[in-house]
Amino acid sequence: MERMPEGPPAAGPVPADASAAARALRVQMLATEHWSLLATRSLSWNESFARAGMFLTLLSGATVALALVAQVTAFGEGFVLFALLTLPIVLFVGLATYVRLLEINNEDYVWVRGMNRLRSAYLEIDPELARHFVTGTSEDADAIFRTFGSPPEAKGSLDTGLFHGLVTTPTTIAFVDAMLAAVLAAIVSVQLKMAMLPASGIGVVAFFVCAAALAYVGYRSQVMAHLYSATSASAGDASPTHR
């Protein structure tokens, strides 16, 4: 009788060395991505400081130039003309700086969320590492704020509430922009033969209108960033590789 051909050999247990190598490779890939996000976040912060510094330097230079022109022209028509030519440019740079700072803050939120996701992957590999992490290890809002250094129990306090929003870099630039808008409005009002007191009132109104408009832009930017984050998180949950 013919001998029946033998089937493929039965699969034996995966060697421990292969499993350890795969685990080490996974940790290496996660660490590489983590360092990439850290470097990107560092670049974002550097750009934030550079943009704010560039605007404040331009504003300081324009203020000194206005002071020199005022001494020469005794606050005459030459001073007004110089101010009307210079301050709009400074205000434009300030508004552009404010918008860019909002974008950088939103980008920073994305980088922090990504690092939280990577920490979650670290815990999948070794759950015992949880007690060593002081930052967030998930993508919910509480964990992200913990990574920013604001624990959930501090919500509503001076650290994370409305008062904190008043001391951020974008808000500081927004107040300076509102001041520039107020000065321009007052100068234009005086040029229209308006008395000093009504012109000052118009400047105050321009300050609050500009500040409110910039606050609305900042709020909309933050809302859109959170919506994008929530949408991408839902897409990640639907992915077969996401846990």
Image (cartoon, rainbow, N blue to C red):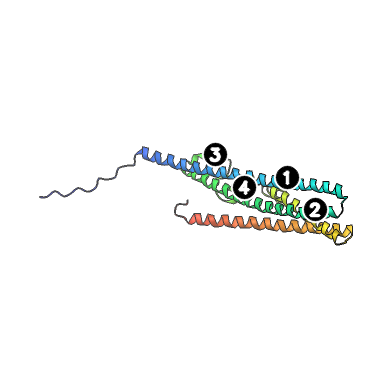
**What x and y, as percent, mark residue 169?**
69, 47
Q: Amino acid at mark 1?
A: Thr
Q: Residue furthest left?
A: 1
Residue at 62%, 47% (x, y): give it.
145
Q: Compare marks 3 and 1 and give the one earlier in the sequence.
A: 1
SS of the residue at dot 2? helix
Q: CA distance from mark 2 to mark 1?
A: 18 Å
For residue 153, side relative to residue 10 (left or right)? right
Q: Quadrant of residue 218?
A: bottom right
| Disc 4 and disc 2 in contact, CB within 8 angstroms | no
Q: Amino acid at mark 4?
A: Phe
**What x and y, as percent, mark residue 78?**
84, 53
Q: Nearer the viewer, mark 1 or mark 4?
A: 1
Q: CA distance from mark 3 to mark 1?
A: 45 Å
Q: Compare marks 4 and 2 and give the one earlier in the sequence.
A: 2
SS of the residue at dot 1? helix
Q: Nearer the viewer, mark 4 or mark 2?
A: 2
Q: Amino acid at mark 2?
A: Phe
Graded by Cα atoms within 10 Å as few (under 14), some (14 to 19) or many (20 or more), the crowding at tag 1 reads few
Q: Amino acid at mark 3?
A: Arg
Q: Which residue is mark 1?
A: 57
Q: Which mark is residue 110?
A: none
